[in-house]
Every structure is written in C-alpha cells, then in structure tokens.
Image: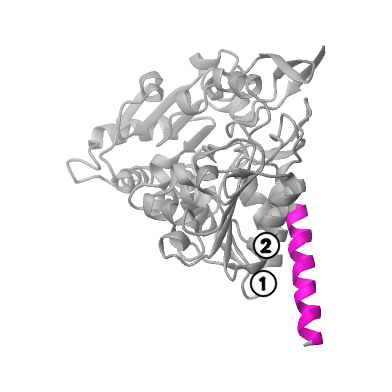
Amino acid sequence: MRTFENTVCSFCGSLCDDIVLEVEDNVITKARGGCAISRRKFLSAIDSEAPLVDGKEVKFDEAINAAVEILAKARHPLIYGLSSTSSEAQAAAVKLGETLGASVDSTSSVCHGPGTVAKQLVGLPTCTLGEVKNRADVVVFWGCNPVEAHPRHFSRYSVQAKGLLREQGRRDRKVIAVDVRRTATARIADIFLQVAPNEDFQVLTALRAVINGNELREETFGGISPEEIQDVCDVLQSAEYGVFFFGMGLTMTQGTHHNVRQALSLVRDLNRKTAFGVIPMRGHGNVAGTETVLAWQTGYPFGINFSRGYPRYSPGEFTVTDLLSRREVDAALIVASDPAATLPARSANYLGEIPTIVIDPYYSATAKLARVFLPSAPVGVAASGTVYRMDQVPLPLRKVIDSKYPSDHDILLAIDKGVTACSASKEALSMIL
C-alpha cells in the first residue's frame, strides 16, 4: 500500500491541497481530508467506457483517426470545454485550434466570462486565499453559495479559518451575504441582503453612492431599504481588510458584466478608505486556468477564433452558445466538459446534428450524442499536470494510479499531429495536380 499526502483535489475552484490518499493494487482505497464530493471523486476513479466511433467499440488508434478525419475536413470547427483538465492540456487545445483555424472557447463564457469582461474594463484589485485566511475581517459573498458549492471554503480559507491576524476564526469576522434567496450561506451570515431578481446593479450603485458620501432619496433599491444599505456600508468601511467574493448570481443575471463592473468599482471606492480585495468564486477545478492559459497563448481569455490565421476575440460571436445557436460550426471537439447537460437546449441539440468528438474521463450526456468518444485518464488521479485555484495560484496535480488510457494532453497532441499530417498531404497533392 502507498500513501500520498498533500494531494490536490481538482473538483472545484478551491483546489484543496491537503488530501491524503491510500492506494493498493492500483485502486484508491481511502481518501481523507476532503469533502464528501472529493472523497467520492477519488474513490470512484476507474477507467471509463471503451473508445467509441458511431456507438461501436473500437481501438484507441481508430478513434483518434476518426477524430482527425472529422476535424481535418471541417471548415469551421469548435473546441470547447477545458475547465476540468490540466493547463498543459489547455495549451495543447489552443495549439490544435490554431492548426485547424477553429474557434476556441471555455466554460468560462457561460459562467464567469462577464466578470472577466468587467475586469478588462475596470481592473481587478485581488488577493490570494491565504490573505483572506490570515487578514480578512469582513467577507462578502455576492451571488454565490460556497456552503453548498465549495464545501470546505469556509473552513479552509474564509469564514471559519483561523489565520495570523484572525486567531479566533469566525469570531473575528463579519460576514455579508447578498442573494435573491436565503441560501445556506445566507443563513450563516451576520447581514443578509435579499435582492430582487435582476436588480443587483441598483443595489451596488446605492452602495457606491453612500460610500462616496451621497444621500439616498429612493424608498428602496432592488428591494433593499436605505437603512440596510447604510448598515452594510458602515461594516464595509470599518473593515481592516475586506474581501468580496462574487459568483454566477452576479455574472449571469440581467446586467451581466455591468453588474461586475459596478462591484469592482465599489471595491475600488472602498480602497480609498480601507483595504479590500476581490476574488471570483470559480466553480470548476481549473476554469481559472483556462482564462490564464488562453490569455498568455493568444492575448485573450475566451471566445477566440483562428480562422484568419491569428487569434480574434469577440464574446457574443465566437462563444459557444452563440456559435451553436446560429449553427455556424460544422464540427465540435469537447474536452473535459458536458455541454449537452448544461447549455441551452437549442445550442446543445445542435451538437447532435454535427460530427462531435468528446475527450473525457467519464461517459457523459455529450458523449452519448457524440460520433467519437475518446476516454482519457482523469487528471489529478491518473494523470499529472497544473491547475489554477480561483485566486490564480497554480498548483501541481499528481498521478496516483495508472490508467489504460492517455491523458487529455497526450490525446490532443496526437490529434494535432494527425491533422497536421493530413494538411501536409493535401498540400503536397495540390502541388502535384
């Protein structure tokens, strides 16, 4: 039996790095230190279905060749997903996208993409989760519910964590929750603002007005009274060090990036009076890494198109829901994602009408409608790599068991090699003719 300490769990954006795994006969027999989701992830790690082409089991090389044939013939392919794999695989996907002249997009465009657009407009005064643990005495959760979505966030990084300057943990902190309903996170908060649906912008504007010394004259702002606004502002301004976490309840409601722009502007205003940071509450294990990798590879974080031989960035044009709903792509390569289960029906259904290739450790809803399914070794379990935590801190993933399948990274490199060879053959044939 082998024991692996300080293992990183890649399930959510918290990337807890204190997991202890026991492995015997290439099977994880015990997982200690993580949440229930983490333990299930590790203990159920087994090889997936066999490679499939048109629903029939084939050898892995045959499935690779089928994927290469589809992508080499496509005039406008789409590469999408990438949020639950390693940064090395993400870089390989960008390389393949450039080879194909494809559109490359990640799940970020349907979750925190608007926040990234806002960050480009205003900037992001951020910090690390370590600073939150050690310094923060005021913590705001806006449009997110970490108690259920990030089970150990409170205990490891934020509300209950005991740090250098917050030795008493929860007793040393004020917690503010803002949401359209009373979530599990809201029930723990010292102050809860129940905002009317789609009116976050109004509340944020009112908060900024008070912080900047203006008087409120309306009776309510997004369902929140001026007295409640004032109480929250008093807590925010009295912070020694505050942190603002925001989730999809802010990014994907009416107003999208305008909401986040106002939130970032609020933090900027607070930094004139005290110290405040912002961290997006990212969901998937390496969705923060997709934006980081795509940005240093292409200059842009998501919604990228290579059809002209160089990267172009256009959210709303080259993002997944828009491309699929307008039926503008003729093939799709889905990597470590399940858009058939998460995208709007109009977009998801189109994946079943075009040749779709899925690379994933698990046989998902998207794999069921795909023409080619390529099972991969699960990253952080049977494949190593790098991932980025929600605060943009990179962490290494280790391989603890073996898989009979290659990693996403190796599969993408093999497809890229095959497509490049096909393109070279076509070019040579055209020269002869």
The stretch drawn in magenta includes residue 416:
yes
The residue drawn where x is 52% and y is 27% is 150
Range of the magenta residues?
Answer: 413-432
Q: Residue furthest bottom?
A: 433
Above or below for 15 versus 206:
above
Quarter in which the N terminus is drawn: top right
Confirm whether residue 299 shows in the render: no
The rendered magenta stretch, by its main secondary structure, is classed as helix
Secondary structure of the residue carrying tag 2 is helix
Going from N to C along the chain, the mark reached first, 2 or 1, is 2
Total marks shown come to 2
Quarter in which the C terminus is drawn: bottom right
Above or below for 403 versus 51:
above
Quarter of the view holding residue 20: top right
- Give the x, y percent position of residue 283: 53, 37
What's the residue type where badge 2 is placed?
Glu
The residue drawn where x is 41% and y is 24% is 185
- Give the x, y percent position of residue 314: 52, 66
Q: Which residue is mark 2?
A: 69
The residue drawn where x is 51% and y is 21% is 159
- Give the x, y percent position of residue 344: 39, 49
How many other residues sit within 10 Å of disc 1, few (<14), some (14-19) or many (≥20)?
A: few
- Give the x, y percent position of residue 427: 77, 78
How many other residues sit within 10 Å of disc 2, few (<14), some (14-19) or many (≥20)?
A: some
Secondary structure of the residue carrying tag 1 is loop
Q: Which residue is mark 1?
A: 310
